[in-house]
Amino acid sequence: MKFVKGNFLPLREFRDLTDLNEQARRWVTEEAGVRIHGTTREQPLQRFVLEKPLLRPLPPIAPDLGTWHRVVVHRDCHVQFDRRLYSVPFALVGKRLWLRATDSFVAIYEDYRLVANHLRARRLGERLTVTAHLPPEAQAFFARDRRWCVARAKEIGPASAELVERLLSDRIVERLRAAQGVLRLAETYSPGRLEAACARALYHASPFFRTVKTILKGGYDAQPLPIAGSTESAYATGARFARDAGQLFDPEHH
């Protein structure tokens, strides 16, 4: 390539690819191919006559040789490459590894030992995680996913199911942790008490883990819910102190 760049390309102009190929063919057959090569001391075209029968055709798909990169394993068991994240076994946290990237795959090595394989992420910020790479406590967390939480809540009761579904409606991991926390309260108290506490939290329009826990801890789940239409709950009846326009502007009501 250095010889071509230094001896063929300078001062040349090309109308199109066809013109470039024609000029290159003439240069090879009339100049570069008939000179005496500095190393072989032969004309390259004469040497090519001997080598040509031994050449093999190019593969239909060009090989993807890939590139190598140094990466560091972060505390979340992932390495970052090209603004994408890939998981590796948690025992490697803090270590520097080698990452080999091709167009389709990413392979991660500790020295010569392959420790992780991933399809190459396509979106910026995408995170590819193998659950087995995570520490045991994290694996347990992700095993109790949204589907598990909804199924377990339905076993406890309709109020629990509705509360958990509301927690998971925004589709973020923090709410998944809250849903798991709500369901674990059934182990400390009981499924029946948890169902009553969820019903009370929903009645007060506060479907949150802290609310359910406070109700159970204070024993408020044992109290009956107010009758629909009563004024015990400001959340259930709307704005208790709101007045219509007639009352608001009537001097007799001031």
Image (cartoon, rainbow, N blue to C red):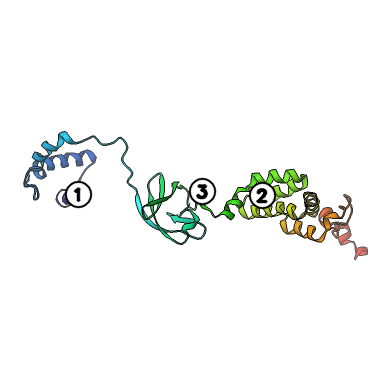
Circle 1 sits in a helix, a strand or a loop, which is it? Answer: loop
What amino acid type is highlighted by mark number 1? Met
Which quadrant would residue 158 be assigned to in this image? top right
Q: Gap between marks 3 and 2, in whole Å?
A: 23 Å
Up-down relation of residue 213 to residue 119 (above or below): below
- Of all residues, the one furthest to the right in this rendering is 252
Tag nearer the camera, 3 or 2:
3
Q: Quick one: SS at disc 2? A: helix
Residue 178 image point, x, y percent: 67, 55
- Which is in the foreground here, disc 3 or disc 1? 3
Q: Amino acid at mark 3?
A: Val
Give the left or right position of residue 99, taking residue 224 as reference.
left
Identify the residue at horizontal 73%, vertical 46% (top origin): 161
CA gap between label 3 and label 1 equals: 43 Å
Q: Say few, some or many: other residues with alpha carbon within 10 Å of mark 3 (under 14 / 14 to 19 / 20 or more).
A: some
Residue ID for mark 1: 1
Dot 3 or dot 2, earlier in sequence: 3
The alpha-carbon separation of the residues under discs 1 and 2 comes to 59 Å
Q: Would you name the residue on which mark 2 appears?
A: 168
Q: Is residue 46 above or below residue 223?
A: above
Label number found at residue 198 = none
Q: Quadrant of the C terminus?
A: bottom right
